Amino acid sequence: MIDLCVLGPTGRMGQQVCQLALASTGIRLASALERRGANVVGSSVPNSTIRIGESLPEALAKADVYIDFTVPTATTLTARAALHEKTAAVIGTTGLDEEAQEAIDELSKVVPVFVAANFSPGVSLLLHLAETAAAALGDDYDLEVVEMHHRHKVDAPSGTALALGRSLASGRGLDFETARQSTRDGQVGPRGADEIGIFAVRGGDIVGEHTALFIGGEERLEITHRAQKRSVFASGALRAATWIVKQAPGRYTMSDLLGF
């Protein structure tokens, strides 16, 4: 049995992870953590006797692994605390800054850490297919990414869209940060041959949709993934948590889990 700590148990993803963990036979929800001073601290996770706490060391000490779908600042603080508690990590926070990445790298030196912008197996396959297609089609095809999410998403482009752009760049042999183009407004001139456009659409309750476009002079190929339920990400995170606790210290991704 694996003991799990869930960060942000009242958030969109945190709620899903908690409920799936409570229904699991191989994972036990051991602790749940909210930001200090949150009005839900002290209340119970629905359908359980687990009290929502605000002490990082206390919550992490109860767990073999924690799952984090929060914000970069919280991810940084938790990774630093987990370093002392030696708690394995599954991190799905997007928009990670340099400070968060450094904290995760330090944690991965002592425990296994799983980091993914998207925990859907289908998205992992999308990234693999996109890289393969970019390499196969060559320079005659322009590469673009379009992503769609619900109106409440705070970062843009999504972490998955950026991962998809990196896959395209890798397949084409381009430096992603140089090729990336997320704004076209005004007299921008002709499209550059080595551009990879990445554009975000926000509205309603769209769970998540990502499309890689390969646009040639005579044909267009589109590879699209649509998430129908948010639970696909939560179940993927739990699968990652079950897998990561058996690994050696290091940093892992969905490609490692799925064997790509």
Image (spheres, rainbow, N blue to C red):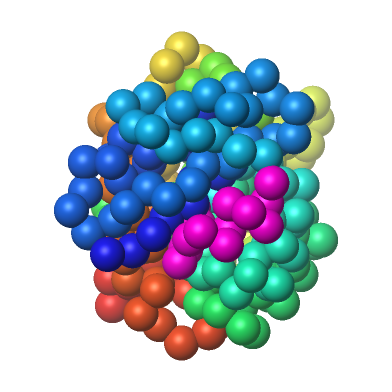
In the rendered image, residue 182, in percent from the top left (x then y), is placed at: 68, 41
Q: Which residue occupies the extreme top position in the image?
A: 204
Q: Nearer the viewer, residue 7 or 125?
A: 7
Q: Does the magenta portion include 63?
A: yes
From the top left corner, tell me how far across and down residue 140 is, in percent. 46, 62
Res 77 → quadrant: bottom right
Q: Looking at this view, is 201 or 30 the one in front?
A: 30
Where 247 falls versus 140 (above or below)? below
Q: Is residue 73 magenta?
A: no
* Numbered range of the magenta stretch: 55-67
User: Quarter of the image containing the N terminus?
Assistant: bottom left
Depth check: 101 or 17 in front? 17
Q: Is residue 138 left or right of residue 218?
A: right
- Compared with residue 227, is residue 102 higher up or lower down, i.e. above or below? below
Q: Is residue 58 shown to the viewer in this render? A: yes
Q: Position of residue 237 (x, y in %)?
A: 38, 53
Q: Residue at position x 51%, y 77% from top?
A: 112
**Which of 63 and 155 lies nearest the eye of the viewer?**
63
- Report whether residue 8 is seen: no
- For the point 35% across and 80% down, the residue is 246
Relative to 222, 55 lies left or right:
right
Residue at position x 33%, y 63% in the image: 2
Q: Quadrant of residue 61?
A: bottom right
Where in the figure is residue 5, as x and y percent of width and height? Answer: 49, 51
Toward which corner of the image does residue 137 lie, by quadrant? bottom left
